[in-house]
Amino acid sequence: MSLLPRTAEEFSSAEYWERFFKKRGEKAFEWYGDYNKLCGVLHKYIKPRDKVLVVGCGNSELSEQLYDVGYRHLTNIDISETVVNHMNQKNAKQRPDLTFQTVDATQTPYEDGSYHVALDKGTLDAMASQEEGALAGRMLAEVGRVLGIGGRYVCVTLAQESVIKLAVEHFIQVGWAVRLHCLGDSESQEVSSFALPVFVLVCTKFRQPMPMPILEMCQGEDGAPARLPVVADLLSVVRERQAYAMLRQRLRTGTDATSTPSLTLCHAPTGRPRYTLTVQDCPPGAKVPRANHFAIFIVPQGRETDWLYGLAEGRGQLAASANFRRLIVVAMHREQEYTDMQAVQSELSPMVMELAPPGMPTNQQVPFLSVGGELGWREVVSHGTSDLSGQYSVEDVRGEDGQLYRRLVFLGNEGLVQSESRLTNPAAAAASSQKKKKSRRKAKPPAPPPMTTPSQTPGGALEVDKGYLCCAHHRVMVAGLAMLGVGTDHNKDVPVSVLLVGLGGGGLPQFLRDFVPGARVEVVELDPAVLEVAQGWFGFTPDDRLTVTLGDGLERINNIEREGGHQYDVIMFDVDSKDPSLGMSCPPPAFVETAFLERVGKLLTPRGVFMLNLVCRDSALKKSVLGRVRGVFPRVLSRGIEGEVNEVLLCSRGTGETGVPPSLLKAGKTLQGALGMNSSGAATCIPQIDITELLEDLKVA
């Protein structure tokens, strides 16, 4: 027999409750929590001397238990005559002063202001769906009438959004103070059949309506109240609590390697995100040591976007390496202070233990894992808001190699580093450069020695290392210039014209301008805020050989093609899509439509190369894009980026060769030499790129 309502309408009808109580009989209906769970918050707001009206009492044992601990002024009302008769018979001898009456809660016979407290356990939930909330509204109005000044409406509820919204807005409009407690069940060792937490709504009546709404949220029965400005914020907090309870319930009852749920823990005083937890379970059949039930891995600050921590595939590999039944991967948030690893462990321990896998022994030791026992390092150096892309943060972080890097991150997509540059100490780099010149090798130049944080760096402030491209796809694009024959005797002193759509931090166009002989670069950037950040924080310096046009790249190319008379040796697309729902995050779909690609082809010189950074997770869409590109450009070479989705396409109108020409590697060596010859010689301006290595992995797309 189903004991829960089949429909919301049935839940709120008198006929349903009549049938329910006749079938249920003696057993109390306590799925909103029993007295032991509710007593703490009830005793806080209801005193033994208070005159209490229990609205929709049902056959709950709550009134009996309150009576037994000294509450003797309880009037219980319910619309079910069956339950009222039953409860009166049950308590006649043992609790003679505990009265139960058959009364409609929307039309009570009691005088105005005759009660101190109205106690409601589930009645609001039952009535809220009836008559589009009008029935519940009449009940709340009646409660307001019978309560005196200073009286409280105390409602135990599951806080379905429509229900809590109806009640809170009602009492805010009549000038009452509203407080909501979320009661957890973390102390219970039993797995409840209800995942949703129980809430207690407390609304207090004042003599004069409050001029400004008082809206507060408390965690637990004794949690400090957090003031919220509007009802929507309260509803948001409720949804978060409910989502967490449901997640916790799911994690307590089983493991699932195919699902990697995550949740954010916020700093209680400010409400700002402090930790993000991602759950990674081992796959079925994995050989996990018996004692390895559960572990917590702390991601170093600033490394959240690394493949190993930022993508599901990477976290899967991390979990396989750790070899526990369940691994919680913890990322720390920017603009939050973390003292040390011990403090982080102490702060996280109570919460993460609620996410332990089923079957873990009670006294099991749970290890906290990390990289070298350190928290990492991050400093936010600037932040702002773009009208096009939202809030952004410019931050310095320490990489896996010990170097310091500067990153631009748009907070709407924190898992993606929009731009990155390596930082260098000019004084240290100059000394290191003199040593390297004595024994320079052909292999990729080693990175500068690991640096300390800026506050500990001798010799002045840090600068962007303009000779180092952090993004692998940028390095591939530079290597693609070998297709032009840059640096060969045949092309000596021949200028190279470049049109680049997408500025980012400006590292790629600055590198082209500084190191490619004869390069003249025009950048098209849609977002003025990005240009401001590039110039202010990433060392981007426009001049007569490096210009920026603010505007839409599509419109700029269409206008150039329409006006005629201008061609480019290289056209590069490195522009991201603002639509996260697409299977392709770079470029926006309009940039790879056939008609637009044909315009791009017309703007190339006879030796010209079109370079596209393609980031597409949808295999069918990617196949379609490649087909369109090949339809316009007879020769398309590609190179994937290890550990990333990016694939760089190098496209030309050349014909005759079906594979990667052997001469390309030779041209790459020539380009390598030309880059070095074109550098200014300054310690911070030495190109650090291995062209040959980048070209070796090219293939025909």
Image: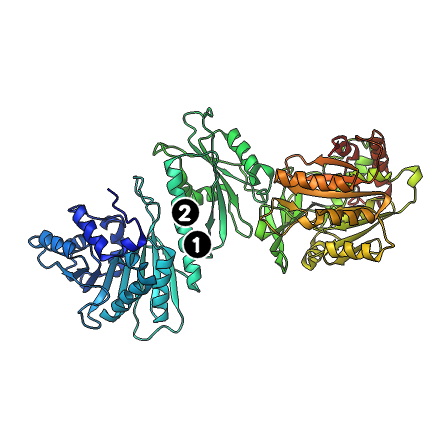
Q: Work out whether 492 lies above or below 109.
A: above
In-image side of 390 versus 255 (left or right): right
**Of residues 150 and 608, the one drawn nearer to the viewer in this rendering:** 608
Determine the secondary structure under disc 1: loop
Split into 4 quadrants, where in the image is the N terminus? top left
In-image side of 639 versus 228 (left or right): right
Q: Position of residue 641 (x, y in %)?
A: 68, 36
Residue type at numbered disc 2: Tyr
Q: Work out whether 640 lies above or below 50.
A: above
Split into 4 quadrants, where in the image is the C terminus? top right
Q: Earlier in the sequence, mark 1 or mark 2?
A: 2
Give me the residue at 65% from left, 43% from top: 452
Closer to viewer: mark 1 or mark 2: 2
User: Tag on residue 244?
Assistant: 2
User: Tag on residue 268?
Assistant: 1
Residue type at numbered disc 1: Ala
Give me the residue at 29% from left, 64% from top: 135
Q: Work out whether 131 lies above or below 419.
A: below
